[in-house]
Amino acid sequence: MLDKNIDLNGKRVLVTGAAGFIGSNLCKELLKEFKNIHIYGIDNMNDYYDPKIKNDRLKEVEALADSSESGEFDFVRGSIADRDLIDNLFSDFKPEVVVNLAAQAGVRYSIENPDAYIEANLIGFYNILEACRHSYDAVKSDANSDYKGVEHLVYASSSSVYGSNKKIPYSVEDKVDNPVSLYAATKKSNELLAHAYSKLYGIPSTGLRFFTVYGPAGRPDMAYFGFTNKLVNGDKIKIFNYGNCKRDFTYVDDIVKGVVNVMQVAPAENENGVKYKVYNIGNNDPVNLLDFVDILQQELISAGVLPQDYDFEAHKELVPMQPGDVEVTYADVTALQEDFGFKPATPLRDGLRAFAKWYKEVYC
Ligand SMILES: NC(=O)c1ccc[n+]([C@@H]2O[C@H](COP(=O)([O-])OP(=O)(O)OC[C@H]3O[C@@H](n4cnc5c(N)ncnc54)[C@H](O)[C@@H]3O)[C@@H](O)[C@H]2O)c1
């Protein structure tokens, strides 16, 4: 296990994408776990999916901050692609830890809306890197300040960087130079840019390749959410490869615990003199898609989202594999376990139960 070298108590933490699914849950966990923590959240609240969900998440974070004895949460609505906004935010707030979760996500959306990916994932991330770089100038210009500049930049990458990698489980040692979507290309670029900035300016950085994250107030563009909407509307859901696809699903609370662990350990210099790490953060426990959907519909029935006599058989269609799809994908999380002792603990049924309860409250 690595020793913690950042104490988040009393720290100033910038979270981009703070109204997002993972970002809002991260802000809540930080407010609960640490004393005198001051979080600055930024999000442009775009309408890629229903912004009401983002507003609701923000309200929860703000309510928690209001009831917290010592934690603070400030929020600005704006884009990380806005250079002046980011530079001003860094010079006024002086973040000590930065977690970059703002991004345009989704693979299919990038076909119609490539600009959104370049803006958020490339220009936005570049602005964050530049601001981290110049955070050290602030230290030099004010000898009396105890601000040390950014001590750790943690940023979201994605399992999509593995593209059509044949080797399972996916390991950070695998060569991932063949992205098959613009989204994946931007995420891989983030890792490359972070490496260069870590080497050139000494920014300690950790990239996290997330595997499918699910949970309450999750993203409506993701398959489990789409399945739920379809089942509720009485539509049929298509289950590829006749259900014999295995995927890694990680409950959001587990992911957030992993991110919080990682935030507290800025990487030491590696053999190339770079303070740089990339980890997979997933479950390492692939689930058969048919089993996943079966448990989902059972929990939707228990929560009262679907009627007790719901005819699941009539609403599922088992279809062949889609071209280019892979049968099994899951994460090799050995490094994360060895370095942080982190392992997701939430059973799939419990996670889907929490999602179903939330869905019932919000949509039924
Ligand atoms: N959820 C997953 O399963 C998953 C898997 C792999 C990678 N990721 C990555 O993790 C991160 C968080 O994902 P999430 O599931 O919470 O997604 P999300 O879409 O819920 O959160 C991202 C947030 O960023 C905001 N945003 C987008 N562009 C912005 C910009 N230019 N400036 C400021 N804010 C902007 C959005 O409004 C949104 O609230 C993303 O970088 C995503 O690519 C997530």
Image: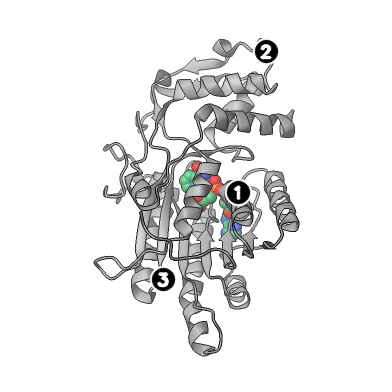
Q: Is residue 31 above or below residue 140?
A: above
Q: Secondary structure at mark 1?
A: helix
Q: Residue at x 26, y 38 (%)?
A: 167
Of callouts 1 and 3, which one flags the residue occurring earlier in the amino acid sequence? 1
Query: Which quarter of the image is occupied by the C terminus?
Result: top right
Q: Position of residue 352 (x, y in %)?
A: 57, 29
Instruction: Tell me the number on the disc at residue 308.
Output: 2
Quadrant position of residue 8: bottom right
Q: Is residue 251 above or below residue 240?
A: below
Q: Residue type at mark 1?
A: Asn
Out of 106 and 23, give the one closest to the viewer: 23
Q: Residue at x 36, y 55 (%)?
A: 278
Pointer 1 local density, CA inside 10 Å: few below 14, some 14–19, many at least 20: many
Q: Position of residue 95 (x, y in %)?
A: 56, 70
Cα–Cα gap, marks 1 and 2: 32 Å
Of callouts 3 and 2, which one flags the residue occurring earlier in the amino acid sequence? 3
Q: Residue at x 61, y 47 (%)?
A: 48
Cα–Cα gap, marks 1 and 3: 25 Å
Q: Residue at x 55, y 11 (%)?
A: 313
Name the residue that disc number 3 marks.
Answer: 203
Q: Position of residue 250 (x, y in %)?
A: 48, 38
Query: Which quarter of the image is occupied by the N terminus?
Result: bottom left
Question: Disc 3, ligand 1: is the CB inside 8 Å?
Answer: no
Quadrant position of residue 232: top right
Out of 320 and 292, give the one closest to the viewer: 292
Instruction: Tell me the number on the disc at residue 234.
Output: none
Residue 156 falls left or right of residue 92: left
Of callouts 1 and 2, which one flags the residue occurring earlier in the amino acid sequence? 1
Q: Is residue 319 above or below residue 341?
A: above
The answer to whether residue 8 shows anywhere in this view is yes
Name the residue that disc number 1 marks.
Answer: 25
